[in-house]
Amino acid sequence: MVINLAKTKELIFYNPRARPKFLPPAISTVERVTSAKGLGIYIQDNLKCDIHFQYIMTISSQILHILKALKRQGLSLEMLHNVCAI
């Protein structure tokens, strides 16, 4: 298996109450991040879900705004269901 180092991210998990004093040395070609998206879910280094919840709320607000705008334009309920199913 060949790993693409340009797309690889390093995420170090830790206990939020006790920040680690020793971190392993960074790999020069791999970016170290505090959160990453994998399989559609945002994962944070402190195992909290803040970023994922914010992402879900943003997407939900955008979809709701689109549905309200289309309803104001007179789109039928059947068509609104088709838009929402996409």
Image (cartoon, helix red, strand yellow):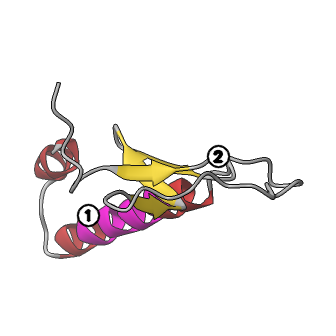
Please, what is the dominant secondary structure of the magenta stretch? helix
Task: Classify mark 1: residues with Cα within 10 Å, few (<14), some (14-19) or many (20+).
Answer: some
Specify whether residue 45 is painted magenta: no
The mark tally for this picture is 2
Image point (13%, 69%), residue name: 74
Q: In which quarter of the image is the N terminus?
A: top left
Q: Nearer the viewer, residue 58 or 41?
A: 41
In the rendered image, the residue lying farthest to the right is 17
Q: Is residue 13 left or right of residue 16?
A: left
Which x, y percent locates residue 9? 38, 53
Q: Which amino acid does label 1 sit on?
A: Leu
Q: In which quarter of the image is residue 72?
A: bottom left
Element assignment for label 1 = helix
The C terminus lies in which quarter of the figure? Answer: top left
Report x, y in % for residue 46: 69, 52
Pick whichever of labels 2 and 1 is earlier in the sequence: 2
Residue 73, relative to residue 32: is it above or below? below
Separation of marks 2 and 1 at Cα, in angstroms: 39 Å
12 left or right, relative to 60: right
In the image, is residue 61 part of the stretch drawn in magenta?
yes
Instruction: Report the magenta residues as a range.
Output: 55-66
The residue that label 2 is drawn on is 13
Type of the residue with mark 2: Phe
Q: Residue at x 29, y 70 (%)?
A: 68
Q: What label does residue 67 carry, if any?
A: 1
Q: Do the residues labelled 2 and 1 touch (CB within 8 Å)?
A: no
Judging depth in this view, the residue of 53 and 29 nearest the camera is 29
Q: Where is residue 12 in the image (x, y as percent from the top left)?
A: 59, 49
Q: In this view, does 4 lie above or below 63?
A: above
Camera-nearest residue between 78 and 65: 65
